[in-house]
Image (tube, grey):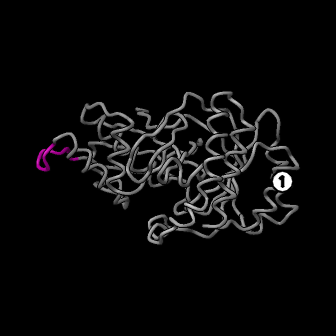
Amino acid sequence: MEIKAKCPASCGELLQGWIEGSEKLISYPINWFSEVTLSDKLIVNKTGNTKAWLAFQQTCEYFGVPENERPRVSLQVKSTIPVAKGMASSTADIAATIGVTASWLQQKITETEIAKLCLRLEPTDSTIFQTLTLFDHLKGTTIRSTDWLPKLGVVVLEPLTILETALFRQESHQNQLLQNEASLARGFALFEQAIRQQKVDLLGVAATISAESNQAILPKPFFKEMLEVVEKLDLPGLNVSHSGTVVGLLYEQQKTDPLEILFELERRYVTTFYSRYYFREWTTGGVQIIS
């Protein structure tokens, strides 16, 4: 028997910061996936992905399967999502593993349960939910779900530099988060308005406000130049990884050619630092069983 599941990456977060009394985030999923396979063909007993194996063991424990009764399986993680860049690569690996393990055990599992299990291993992203969701990524609490996922493209800008989320979180940023609270409240109000009215321009402004606020915590090089491109091409906005190194320039696919965005970035030497770039699309989030 063989079962596969996948979970998407994100390009940073639309919003992240001190929102409604605690640190929360809203990620958005893109069409870049981690795929996890469980098989009873014991050709490969394990991969180097320790977190995935821990997720497998924790899911078995969650469903009351004692260690001596757990299935003997091979577990393989297939992913090209950049690691330590703020693209939810670990969340994708772990969540897909939890989903495929539950399926193997013939158990149903909800998005909220997946979130709780992910959080046992590390803070997680809201890409585990099908739609844009305000999420307490430290407590695993779903604060507010939405019913809209706009069709947008994103030019993902990736520098060579890395940033381990766990190491970044060892330093307290609470004072700066609290100083940014008012601007994040404005951004979140615009986000909620964008959801109600289904307007991508408001969504982009909300993301840009959050990105600008984060410059005081984890500044992104060439930020001013990227804002110039947003304004020149009338893009909805940009977003950043608030605990990573990637930046996303959001665009409407029927309105803007992503090569035009790239040209303007190159003109401003932005790509001398963000030397890798990808054209991706927003997609439905959550864990999907694919075979």
Which quadrant holds the C terminus? top left
Residue 204 location, quadrant: top right
Residue 279 percent coordinates (x, y): 70, 47
Whether residue 246 sits left or right of residue 108 in the image: it is right
| Image height of 119 relative to 268, above or below | above
Local secondary structure at mark 1 = helix
- What residue sits 46% from the left and 48% below the top? 92
Residue 203 percent coordinates (x, y): 68, 40
Residue 19 percent coordinates (x, y): 53, 49
Residue 35 location, quadrant: top left
Q: Nearer the viewer, residue 58 or 47?
A: 58
Which quadrant holds the N terminus? top left
- What residue sits 64% from the left and 39% below the top? 191
Q: Nearer the viewer, residue 99 or 234?
A: 234
- What residue sits 65% from the left and 53% below the top? 183
Task: Name the residue tied to disc 1.
Answer: 229
Whether residue 67 sits left or right of residue 200 in the image: it is left
The reply to whether the magenta stretch includes residue 69 is yes
- What residue sits 55% from the left and 46% below the top? 27
Residue 95 location, quadrant: top left
The amino acid on which the numbered mark 1 sits, given as a three-letter code, is Val
Whether residue 102 sits left or right of residue 140 in the image: it is left
| Image height of 274 relative to 258, above or below | below
Q: Which residues are magenta?
A: 65-72
Q: Nearer the viewer, residue 284 or 111?
A: 111
